[in-house]
Amino acid sequence: MKRNSLAFALISAMSAVSVPHAAAQSAPAIPGYTMGQKSLAKAPYTLAELESLKKTLLFTDEDIRYLRMSKAILADQTEAVLDVWYGFVASTPELVVYFKNNKTGAPDGAYLGAVRKRFGQWIADTADANYDQAWLDYQYEIGLRHTTPKKNKTDKADSVPLVNFRYLSALTIPVTTTLKPFLAKKGASAADVEKMHAAWVKSVLMQTILWSYPYVRDGQF
């Protein structure tokens, strides 16, 4: 499928999905959102290893404070943020292919809608993370859902079997770059916007590193 037709198909699929505001949803109301559930496998990395990763990323309590600040700022902008992110995916064939329906070759609207609801919750979770065992276990679950063992199963989608590894950490840049203007929309000082943005860059990179575990050979993560 040509670039323009694939992008148009994705945009059409997006517009057909009615998504309630993420801030108004309770976690159990989001299908496939399993943070804190006992059914999750325990993460193969430890809280101590998470602390070491945070140190390497220069991720400090100040970053946590600025992430917390961003939560209220982003709460009523979640759908607008998601529109921008999904628009980027729509214009990038290398990414939209991961939502392709294998039978039709077009983006799967139901799959997109289900992921979008969890993506909205992810914004809130990133801003308000506790970095405890439940959070760590869910990062592992998210990683699995990008790879063959679990991709498509949560939403019963008929799509490609995995998201290629190279795009996980690469998405840190478009996600956080396009988020920055939203951080500046509620009157925060320029200095605070810069610190919130820096905290988001570190947090998203840290999460994508954790998500990469299923792609890495045993003992090499």
Image (cartoon, grey):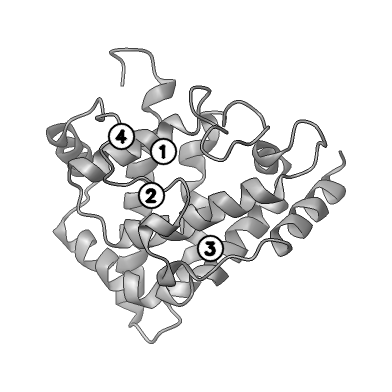
Q: Residue at x 50, y 71 (%)?
A: 21
Secondary-structure class at tag 2:
helix
Q: Mark 4 or mark 1, which has the lower sequence index?
A: 4
Q: Residues within 10 Å of mark 3 (few under 14, many from 20)?
A: some
Of callouts 4 and 2, which one flags the residue occurring earlier in the amino acid sequence?
4
Which residue has dot 2 on it? 204
Residue at 39% of width from left, 19% of height from top?
A: 216
Query: Image quadrant of residue 74?
Result: bottom left
- The disc placed on residue 178 is 3
Q: Is residue 5 above or below residue 117?
A: above
As shown in the figure, which amino acid type bears the numbered disc 3? Thr
* Mark 4 and mark 2: Cα distance apart in space: 25 Å
Query: What x and y, as percent, mark residue 214?
Result: 40, 23
Give the amino acid type for the residue marked by disc 1 in the picture.
Ile
Label 1: which residue?
Answer: 142
Near mark 4 (Cα within 10 A), the count class, few <14, some 14-19 or many ≥20, is: few
Contact between labelled residues 3 and 1, with CB atoms less than 8 Å apart: no
Q: Quadrant of residue 103?
A: top right
Residue identifier under label 4: 39
